Image (cartoon, coloured by chain):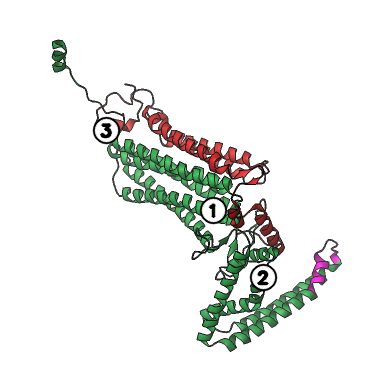
Chain colours: A green, B red
Amino acid sequence: MSHEAHAAGHVKLQYQPALPLRNGKLFLWLFLSTEIMFFAGLIGMYIVLRFGATVWPVPHAVHLSEPIGAFNTFVLICSSVTIVLALEAAKSNKSDAARFWLALTLALGSVFLGVKAYEYNAKFAHGIIPTQQGAPYHNIYEKADIYYGSAVKYRAEELNDALSADIKARNVQAEFDEAYAKYSEANKSLSTIDAKIEPDLVLATGAEFKPADQPKADAALAKLKEDLGKIDTAAAQANKYGDMDVEFSRTKYFYLKDNLPTILSEAQSEKSATLYGLAARFMPMAGERDKRHFHGENDRFTWLKMPIVIPGGNMWTSTYFTLTGFHAIHVIVGLICFALMIPKKYTAANCGVIENVGLYWHFVDLVWIFLFPILYLF
Amino acid sequence: MADHSHSHDTHDSHGHGGHDSHGHADHGGLGKYIQVFLALCVLTGASFFTYSDAWPYHDTPAVGWAFMMAVSCTKALLVMLFFMHLKWEADWKYVLTIPASFMSVFLVLALIPDIGMRVKGNYGYHHSADRMTIVGEPSDTKALVDASLKYAPGDGAGH
């Protein structure tokens, strides 16, 4: 015992850090390990909901473009390289080079966010917004049933009421009626021209094309061009008012006058084929392996905003915006860090902050590496 | 003490003695980063290949999913090993990454049979009747696609 006490008095204690790394880096890694679990929870949520769903929309049904997603993946990979190069430059005491690579990383991250914003905007423009059925701005129906039909009817009447009030307030009813008469006349003459010219064109372009038919085809095309010119003149006359708002209202007036009766009667139909026809008219959808992107009336008239049918679309929308939204928040945090770091001077002594933020940025890249295939390609 | 930590850790104030003189002077470097970058680009292309018409397994999507997950895991490993320098870190890396990875993988694996596979059996869906009246089904997609082809047979040059 006395020996031990004696030894304790003379032992030379040597203090060592518990782990051979900086505190900042240790905490960043602890943070990242919680982030791994956070995103694993989100991705797990997606996988479970997707495979548990009765039906899931294919990417082009929800206006998701695979090439754009692949481009964004490439942008993030590039930014991962630039932030690594920023760290290497700082370690070699090349402060200007480090700041250049930081700025480039900031620019690439901004490109990623810009592309993401473009994609979000395309979804919003198609009414693909994560809301509950019946909530304001809710537009996606799972199937073309009576609820869909009544939503279409409601929207059609809403448009019509608003337009009627507008026309009344502007006192332009007579002018609109006159313009509409001209417009339908032009449309009618277009259909007669079609009927007259079509046989000649078929003859000239069909399978049994003979060189002798060439003059006939040329004459038919020339006639078509001339008549189209006449229609353009008629349309220009119909649109003689310079006021943009009036012109906009007139487009609506023409559309509703042409289509409202059909839309209202089809919306109240009990036949599901009729309701699906209505849904296809507003936002048509190509088949699974068909990569075409159809344009419906919702695309042609952006103010129309008719309810659309995307089977499985509501769950898709919720998961897509949750996953990409949380990822985008992480990107924004990274960009703020880069922006704050660029003005500073970097040497090997203070390059730790670049390493820490770089680790975080690589993690953001890692998450996207998994999000890209499961959202765009699965 | 076998300290494999990265050379700039030598600049911290802990005075740890004897780092970086042994072993790993060759880690990192522009050449290696560019190699990894090219590998990541090629792997992204490989994932994207499943979208092209040349991909032979469109009829069995599970093949594509497994392929893409394998590609993604490879990409994730490349980023972690080289860009996040884990290849050259000391053994503390296992303490932080392995438990987190286990928890995340098992979280997903545990949920898939419980929720993911429960509702879709060999004999149709196991949703409640109430849910089935409002939820879209593959037949709804088919009806919409058929109606769309009738509506716009020649349309669709692209976005």
Q: Which residues are magenta?
A: A196-211
Residue hosting label 2: A266
- Spatial CA distance of label 3 from label 1 is 50 Å
Q: Is residue A353 left or right of residue B84?
A: left
Chain where mark 1 sits: A
Q: Whole-percent x and y of residue A331? A: 41, 49
Chain where mark 3 sits: B
Q: What amino acid type is highlighted by mark number 3?
A: Asp
Which element carries disc 2, helix, strand or loop? helix
Q: Earlier in the sequence, mark 2 or mark 1?
A: 2
Residue hosting label 1: A315
Q: What amino acid type is highlighted by mark number 1?
A: Met
Which element carries disc 3, helix, strand or loop? loop
Which of the labelled discs sits on residue B46, or is there none? Answer: none
Q: Residue at x 59, y 82 (%)?
A: A239
Same chain check for tags 3 and 1: no
Q: Whole-percent x and y of residue B88? A: 40, 29
Residue hosting label 3: B12
